[in-house]
Amino acid sequence: MEENLISKKELLELTGISYGALYRWKRKRLIPEEWFIKKSTFTGPETFFPRDKVLERIEKIQEMKEQVSLDDLAKQFSGAPLDIQITVQQLLDAQIVSPALERMADFSATQELDFYGALYLCICDDLITNGHLSIIEADGILAHLLADYKTFEKPPVLNIYRKMGITFSILMEENSQTAVDGDAKLIVSVPTEQMWEVLKTKWGNEDERNEA
Amino acid sequence: MNVMKLSGVTYANGGTYENVKVEGVANINGDMNCAEMRVQGVSNFSGNIQCTNMDIGGTCKVKGNVKSEICRLSGLLTVEGDLETDTFNGSGSFQVGGSINAEDVDIKFVYGSGAGEVCGENIKIWKESVSGAVDFILDLIPWRHKGKNFRCNLIEGDTINIENVEADVVRGKTVMIGPECRIDLVEYHDALNIYPGASVKKTVKLGE
């Protein structure tokens, strides 16, 4: 797959950061090692980055490094789930999920959730509030996520299809090949990795607010 | 507090320690995780090392990667993987197979040093000066010619100040190329100084 890449020189010029900062962030694991793609060009070896990902990440770092230490930022960006125990009510209060979820079948405001549980709710909430799914369909998705999500090493992509009025979902690794019946229409593709980060940032900020 | 002190000829396994001290000859299996490490004898590590403060006075060979906040060198260090540290300073001989990634690199090297890449903010690499007579006698040893200069593929940083370095590409904001350097390509943003005795094939000013 041909990815949209940006060279290191271009990146530094565009963002105005220095070599030192870039390597410091690499050392602190703020920028994952996989993003450093070495290629040889006619001027010699040059390092490239996936353009969108790295620009977004650097913007985030620059925005947040004033308030949060680099080590805390690294924790936020690393793939590890947050060690949290929250109730659904807390999620509602923090406006991470919307009250629309209350109409789901096994909804209970006092239920305790870990990070994954919160993530599943966020995904369902996102699907419902964006109008991709009905409440009843979201129940099915939630069951699917509960059953299979943790079997993936990396946050998978959730694809939702509809064929002749029937909704079904597929969890798959990013960029992996799948072939789906031509009649099935792709309703939405949710990169759960993004949701993962969104939840982490939101909850991280929430934590600080509580402490302050 | 977990302390590991090795003296004499020993074999040990890695693990998590507060303090690690090697005084004899030690072979250490597996990954090592510690706060403070002092090597004064000869040590071979078969895994990765992660520590806060690393002081190498003797010989240290590492098969994996090294990650440390401070790395002081006054002996001989060989790392087959990458070396990541905030400050890397001292004098001695070092070989790094992968890249050196450090905030400040301040190294006086003796013969036989090199690395795949050196990246960081302030990079200063120069040669330990030995008196002319000693140098002349040492030059009679044939294997010493091979590693007279510091050899690496890429040096990249904000301020670069190098001497006796052979590199393919040097890229930085402020670059000083000292005597006895042999560089194929220098790319710089703000300033470039080349010592008359240095050989640089091509220079490019970036950002125009």
Image (cartoon, coloured by chain):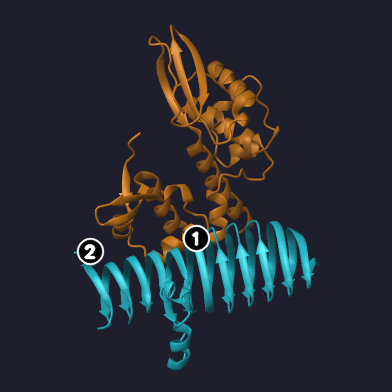
The residue lying toward the viewer, choosing from B51 and B74, is B74
According to the image, label 2 marks what residue? B207
Which chain is drawn using orange? A
Q: Mark 1: give few (<14), some (14-19) or many (20+) Cα within 10 Å.
A: many
The residue lying toward the viewer, choosing from B112 and A112, is B112
Task: Using residue B111 as the reference point, say whether residue B60 is left or right of it.
Answer: right
Residue at x-position 68% and y-position 27%: A108
Whether residue A130 is visible here, answered yes or no, is no
Q: Nearer the viewer, mark 2 or mark 1?
A: 1
Query: Which shade is chain B?
Result: cyan
Whether residue A155 is visible here, answered yes or no, is yes
Chain letter of the residue beneath label 1 in the structure image: B
Chain letter of the residue beneath label 2 in the structure image: B
Label 2's element?
Answer: loop
Label 1's element?
Answer: strand
At which x and y percent is residue B186? Answer: 27, 68
According to the image, label 1 marks what residue? B97
Q: What amino acid does circle 1 point to?
A: Gly
At which x and y percent is residue A8? Answer: 33, 56
Q: Mark 2: give few (<14), some (14-19) or many (20+) Cα within 10 Å.
A: few
Residue at x-position 51% and y-position 64%: B96
Q: CA distance from mark 2 to mark 1?
A: 31 Å
Residue at x-position 62% and y-position 53%: A210
Q: Earlier in the sequence, mark 2 or mark 1?
A: 1
